Structure formats: structure tokens, C-alpha cells
Amino acid sequence: MLKEMLMIHPLGQTAAVVFGLFNLFTGLTRRCLILALHVNFGVLFYALMFLGAAVGALVVRLAVHRDVVVVPWFTHGLFALGFMAVLLCGALSGFLLLARKSRPVWMLALHRYSNITAVALFGVQAYTGLRALAAIVYAAPR
């Protein structure tokens, strides 16, 4: 079950980043596309990221229970906590932008740069996650 969950976690996170990249495109070219499309893909992005984080936390609990803990998990988990903070900032600023008639420039910038940072942090998460996955696959009891 641990190996299956180890495969579900990165696939879900990758699907979320595909939504995130499309959302980044629709957000930067909002004048050409429909705002509802940007909002809906944003909700999918945030929902899949938080669901993936929950699956990742469950995988860690199972691996600790089976004594299959590897060093790259610490780095992966540390960046995941920062990632979650950036995602919350992006989500909250986006929902506040939708609720307000006036859009302050600082809030637009906060929303834009927190989400660009989230997509960039995915690269770090993918690298550390693949290292942890390789260590688990080769170290896990058969």
C-alpha cells in the first residue's frame, strides 16, 4: 500500500501543477480569456495541492510506522510547509480580490507573485520528492 500511495502523491501533485500552469496563463492573459475559467482552475489547483499534501503526510506516517524513513524527507517536508504557506497566501489573496470591487495594486502583486512562487516551489518539491521516492522504492521491504 505504501508504494501505491507513493505513486498517487506525485501524480496528483503533477496534475495540480498542470492546472496551476494553465491558471498562471489565464491569470496573466486575463483580457483574452474568461475570468470564471481562471477562478475555477485556481480552485482545482489549490484543492489538488492540499489533497496531495494530505496524501503526502499520510505516506510519511505509514513510512515512519514501517521504519522506512529517509533523509530527503526532511528537506521535502520543510519545503512543503513553506509551499503550503505560499499556497494559502495565493488562495486568500485571490478570494479577497474576487470579493472586492476595488483591487489594490499590492494585493494583485501579492496574488501574482505568491502563485508564481508556488509554481516555482513545485520544481524544488519535485526534485526532493523524487529523491525521497527513489530512496523508498529501493529501501522498502518487498
Image (tube, rainbow, N blue to C red):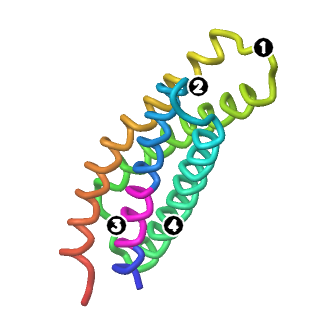
Tell me the mark number nearer the camera, choosing from 3 and 1. Answer: 1
Q: In the displayed structure, would residue 57 be above or below residue 84?
A: below
Residue shown at the point (67%, 28%) measured from the top left: 93
Mark nearer the N terminus (3 vs 1): 3
Amino acid type indicated by mark 1: Ser
Q: Residues within 10 Å of mark 1 (few under 14, many from 20)?
A: few
Secondary element under disc 4, as helix, strand or loop, is helix
How far is disc 3 from disc 4 in space, using C-alphas? 16 Å
Amino acid type indicated by mark 2: His
Is 68 left, or right, of 95 in this rendering?
left
Mark nearer the N terminus (1 vs 4): 4
Identify residue for label 4: 55
Q: Nearer the viewer, residue 3 or 141?
A: 3
Q: Is residue 138 inside the magenta stretch?
A: no
Identify residue for label 1: 102
Q: Nearer the viewer, residue 78 or 8?
A: 8
How far is disc 2 from disc 1 in space, using C-alphas? 15 Å
Identify residue for label 2: 111
Badges 3 and 4: C-beta atoms under 8 Å apart? no
Mark nearer the N terminus (3 vs 4): 4
Identify residue for label 3: 69
Secondary element under disc 3, as helix, strand or loop, is loop
Q: Residues within 10 Å of mark 2 (few under 14, many from 20)?
A: many
Residue shown at the point (58%, 25%) measured from the top left: 111
How far is disc 2 from disc 4 in space, using C-alphas? 26 Å
Residue 86, given in percent of the width and then of the height, sits at: 54, 34
Mark nearer the N terminus (2 vs 3): 3
Tell me the mark number nearer the camera, choosing from 1 and 4. Answer: 1
